[in-house]
Image (cartoon, rainbow, N blue to C red):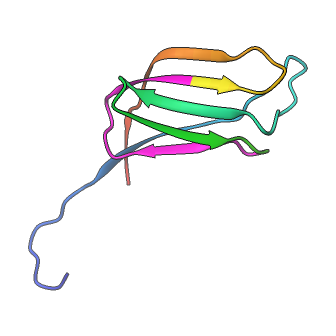
Amino acid sequence: MAGVGAAYAQATASISGVVKGRAGGVVPGVTVVVKDDGRRSQEAVTDSEGPIFRSGAPGRVYTVTASLTGFKSAEAKGVAWLPVSR
């Protein structure tokens, strides 16, 4: 906006990554759910590059669950999203 004398930095947080099998290969089609203390959740299905979750509320602690039919689900509790300046 023209004429504005102050600038504001905005911080966001994100989780990204790929799901790999025991042999080290990327596993597509895995449903990944990121949930913050029961208030909000995001879901995505992996591909060769993995899902990327973004949040406007860095600093919260989340539970990340990954599941695929025919495989045991994996869960990571206490995952902290750290802010990244954009």
In the image, residue 73 above or below residue 42: above
Q: In the figure, 45 relative to 64: above or below?
A: below
The answer to whether residue 67 is left or right of residue 4 is right
The answer to whether residue 62 is magenta is yes
Asked whether 57 falls inside the magenta stretch, the response is: yes
Give coordinates of residue 12: x percent, y percent.
36, 46
Residue at 64 percent across and 36 percent down: it is 17
Q: Position of residue 67 (x, y in %)?
A: 70, 25
> In which image quadrant can residue 16 be found?
top right
Image coords of residue 61 (percent x, y) = 37, 23
Residue 25 as seen in the image, left or right of residue 61: right
With 33 as the anchor, is 25 left or right in this view? right
Front residue (pair 27, 7): 27
Residue furthest to the right: 23
Q: Position of residue 24 (x, y in %)?
A: 86, 24
Residue 46, by quadrant, is top right
Tell me which segment is drawn in magenta.
Answer: 49-64
* Residue lying at 87% horizontally and 30% vertically, measured from the top left: 25
The one of 12 and 4 positioned closer to us in this rendering: 12
The mark total stands at 0
